[in-house]
Amino acid sequence: MAQIVKGADVAAKLRENIKERLEALRAKGRDAKLSVLSVGDDPANASYERGIIKVFTTLGIAYEKVVLEGNCTQAEFDKKFTEINEDPSVTGILVFRPLPKPLSVEFAARTIDPDKDIDCMGYYNQASTAMGSKDCFYPCTAEAVLKFIEFEEIDLAFKNVVVIGRSTVVGRPLVSMLISRNATVTCCHTKTADITDRISNADIVVTAAGSRGLLKGDMMKNAKKDCFCIDVGINMREDGQGICGDIEFESVEPLAGKITTVPGGVGSVTSTLLAEHVVRGAELKL
């Protein structure tokens, strides 16, 4: 049976550092504040938002949510974003994406203050991540994967990592982040012909495709026995009762060396990293 690596354990280690830095900030008369901009009320964001509120409340970090009507215009969205971006009390901005069509984040991505771009939406931090910089804001979910690997004290040099997913939020930036840490990376997605073949001899498999039950036990037959399976996917369960990941846990768990769960895995670490980024944004403004 695989060792289950719990997000709570990884997040707890991160929170200790955040608390110390918050105290140091406040001693200098500075505080941290996250502003979330949402268009409409998308249920898909509800689970993520609950996690954010829980972490921010525990740490005592200010949190505000600005909600625009689902039928707002591009001009209205851009104006509200500009107000938040120019607010000196805000040290981190999170835009719930994707926006309802035909709205675009183009203006926001071009104009966001890089020091407030705590989830790597803007072009500056996206480019810095792609170039292998370690002095920028990474996408929180992609960085959470690295935190699990660091928590298990895995040296990525000479390791074979398979990332299933190519989104600009997780898959693509994660590939760049892993390569910059000397991993050998294969990127797959839902249109990859034979994922089973691709993950043969894998040391780590990361699923981030948003496809329920994508990774099944029979696909793990050639992976290494100590393979670490990290599930980033968030999907509704088939019965509509709760959420599940991209990994078919019941069939994959007996064949993996280590594994994360959904819920209880990457989500809590992502929310904690969001808090760390907001605090770092405040530090950068000192």
Image (spheres, helix red, strand yellow):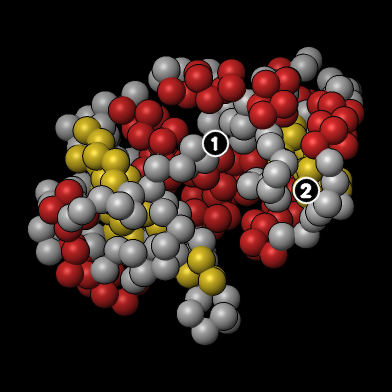
272 is higher (above) or lower (below) than 190 = above
Q: Earlier in the sequence, mark 1 or mark 2?
A: 2
Observer-nearest of 215 and 69? 69
Q: Which residue corresponds to mark 1?
A: 139
- Crowdedness of circle 2 by 10 Å Cα count: few (<14), some, many (20+)? many
Place residue 226 in its image quadrant. bottom left
The disc placed on residue 213 is none
Q: Identify the residue at horizontal 50%, vertical 20% (top origin).
A: 127
Task: Tell me if I can see residue 38 in this picture.
Answer: yes
Q: Give the residue type at disc 1.
A: Pro
Residue name at image x 77 percent, y 17 percent? 285
Residue 99: x and y in percent read 69, 46
Q: Quadrant where the C terminus lies?
A: top right
Q: As rendered, which of 125 and 256 lies closer to the eye?
A: 125
Q: State left or right for residue 148 relative to residue 136.
A: left
Which of the two residues, 97 or 33, is positioned nearer the viewer here? 97
User: Does the residue at mark 1 contact the one at mark 2 (Cβ under 8 Å)?
Assistant: no
Against 226, is 179 above or below? above
Q: Which mark is residue 38?
A: 2
Q: In the visual, does 121 lie left or right of 41?
A: left
Q: Is residue 5 left or right of residue 25?
A: left
Q: Quadrant of the N terminus?
A: bottom left
- 261 or 87: nearer the viewer: 87
Secondary structure beneath dot 2 equals: strand
- Name which residue type carries label 2: Ser
Q: Residue at x 36, y 34 (%)?
A: 175
